[in-house]
Image (spheres, grey):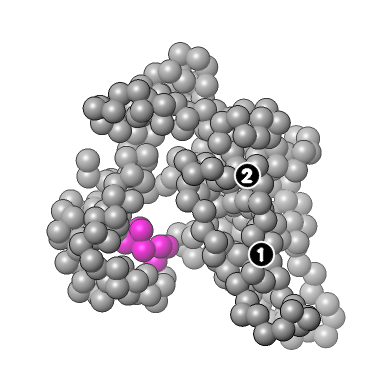
Amino acid sequence: MTANKKYKDSLFRHLFNTKSAQLELYNAIYGTNYQDESIIDTNTLLKMLFTSPENDLAFSVNEKMLILFEHQSTINENMPVRMLTYITRIYEKRVGKKIYRKSLVKLPRPEFIVLYNGKEPFPKEKRLRLSDAFEKIDDSDLISLDLIVRVININKGVNPKLARRSKILDGYVTFIAKVREYEKKYPRKKLEEAIKAAIRYCIKNDILADYLKQNSSEVVNMLMTEHNVKDAIEVAREEGIEKGIERGIEKGIEKGMEKTKNYVLDLMAQGLSHEEIKKKIEEIS
């Protein structure tokens, strides 16, 4: 299946693209019960990032807290560094020339969260620290900078209390679990068939039913796109062009692209084969 550009959004980001959904997610994570959606501000924050936001979800709460979310199926130990680059850009845009004022410029407190739903075993919650990446000179050295990322395992059954606090999040993890279940149950069938079977199951059992009824084709394409991007990159690795991919990452950053995976996605959207994608990556290596 050729990826379509309009399906670049991930299913997670698509589900939580409204203030009501973001407020629900916030309440679930922090155990609060806010009802007023006006406390959530998404547009202002996104304007502080690149045109295509590099993180999965970002919003501010009451102008006092900035929350940056990532959703991952594979744990990236470099998330603290990535989050540091995000928050630095945001603060730089927010403060601007006010940084030269004598009086203190107040900043909203940042929170960094990764929601994990990969297949590899992982604890309920883990904290990744920026300081873990620092070269050790002396154990007694004072660490002048640190950043903590909460990694929360949202796989079905791992954090049931969290799931119960958000119907959308619980529906999402249930749906993904069903896709994986059908993949194992019908190994000869394609991933697309497993996704469609999971959609039918969830609609029948009133799990994200309204959303899936209205967006079934988009959901199939979003999940297939995510799978195809991973597959294209894996093929590239197998063909021995890791250096080309690394150079592609550098080029992607230089050109302000969202991520190298989206560069691959753009090529796929043009209908290029794996061989043609390989050639394109080699050209910028």
Q: Mark 1 Cα within 10 Å, few/some/many (few <14, many 20+)?
A: some
Q: Give the residue number, with chain letter if any, for mark 2.
A: 123
Q: Please, what secondary structure does the residue beneath circle 1 have?
A: strand
**Residue 91 visible within the image:** no
Query: For the point 85% across and 80% down, which residue is it?
Result: 103
The spot of residue 253 in percent (x, y) is 41, 72
Q: Residue furthest top?
A: 204
Specify start and end residues of the magenta stretch as a single range: 257-263
Q: Please, what secondary structure does the residue beneath circle 2 have?
A: loop
Disc 1 versus disc 2: nearer the observer? 2
Quarter of the image containing the N terminus? top left
Of residues 121 and 215, which is closer to you in this image?
Answer: 121
Q: In this rendering, is residue 67 above or below 48?
A: above
Of residues 252 and 119, which is closer to you in this image?
Answer: 119
Looking at the rendered structure, the kind of residue marked 1 is: Arg
Residue 215 forms part of the magenta stretch: no
Quadrant location of residue 185?
A: top left
Of residues 110 and 247, which is closer to you in this image?
Answer: 247
The spot of residue 239 in percent (x, y) is 20, 62
Quadrant location of residue 29?
A: top right
**Residue 146 visible within the image:** yes
The spot of residue 149 in percent (x, y) is 65, 58
Query: For the point 33% across and 44% down, which residue is it?
Result: 227
Q: Mark 2 Cα within 10 Å, few/some/many (few <14, many 20+)?
A: few
In the picture, the disc for residue 23 is none
Q: Are marks 1 and 2 in contact (CB under 8 Å)?
A: no
In the picture, the disc for residue 129 is 1
Looking at the rendered structure, the kind of residue marked 2 is: Pro
Query: For the point 16% across and 53% down, which residue is it?
Result: 273
Q: In this rendering, is residue 243 above or below 232?
A: below
